[in-house]
Image (cartoon, helix red, strand yellow):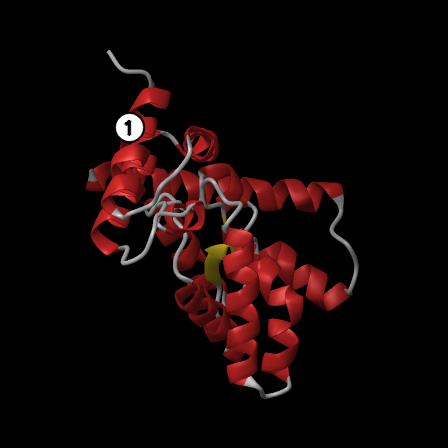
Amino acid sequence: MKTDVEKILEAVSVTAELTGADLSENAKAAMVEELLPFGVGKSLDALNRCRRELTGRLTLAAILQRLDTGLPSADEAFGLLAEGWRNEALTVVVPEIAMQAAGMGAFGLFQAGDKTGARMAFREAYVRLAADVREARWTASAGSDREQRTRAVEAAVRDGRLDAHRAAAYLPSEAAEARLRLENRPLLPHEIEAGRAHSARLLALLADKIGRMQ
């Protein structure tokens, strides 16, 4: 039975030959080393896409661009964030690197009214950050509409983007939030616990709902 290294190496060799890339053994080994952390399945899928799509020689960058890490495209991620920027009531669930990319100039440009410049700056930063991502990690940009926030978080849990532990941080505790706004003070320990209990109840209801759907 072939090892993972042998399977990926064979696929790299075949793809290189089909795309007219004369790779040395050291170059192939370097590609395999880069691909191994992604696993055999994702690596072979990316190489299959290279065979179908490339019109030039095989490169490591071409393979990495075709790896399925679960990330949306840069334009899709920007669209999600921009929707939240335009409407502060909305909660949007986005990859963590989208939030990072937004902070590299895109958000400032958007606020200044330069939507085209914001999109371009975001795309450049997002693509650069995505090159180092092995698997997408998601986060939520919380809006002021509590009901919509709960629906967005529940949908993210159902889609496998947020686990229950991470989701609990975004589920609202209405009473605690109301006191915080009115009194303009940090939450006390017992209030934090009350918020956690409220979130736990919401998560239990969500888990039960998902269980009945399956």
Q: Quadrant of residue 29?
A: top left
Q: Nearer the viewer, residue 149 or 22?
A: 22
Vertical order, 145 against 96 (above or below): below
Residue 89 seen in render: no
Vertical placement of residue 32 versus 19, above or below: above
Q: Is residue 71 left or right of residue 129?
A: left
Whether 182 is drawn above or below 158: the answer is below
Residue receiving disc 1: 10
* Quadrant, the C terminus: top left
Residue 94, image x, y percentages: 47, 57
Q: Secondary structure at mark 1?
A: helix
Q: Residue furthest right?
A: 185
Q: Quadrant of residue 40?
A: top left
Q: Could you say where residue 17 lies in the image, as x and y percent from the top left?
A: 26, 40
Residue shown at 58%/80% (left/top)?
Answer: 110
Q: Position of residue 109 (x, y in %)?
A: 62, 80
Say which residue appears at 65% left-offset and 72% top-offset: 105
| Whether residue 133 can be seen here | yes
Hey, which quadrant is residue 72 in on the image? bottom left
Given the image, on which type of amino acid does mark 1 rest?
Answer: Glu
The residue shown at (39%, 61%) is: 73
* Residue drawn where x is 40% and y is 47% of the image: 59
Front-most of 124 and 206?
A: 124
| Image spot of residue 38 (x, y percent) | 41, 34
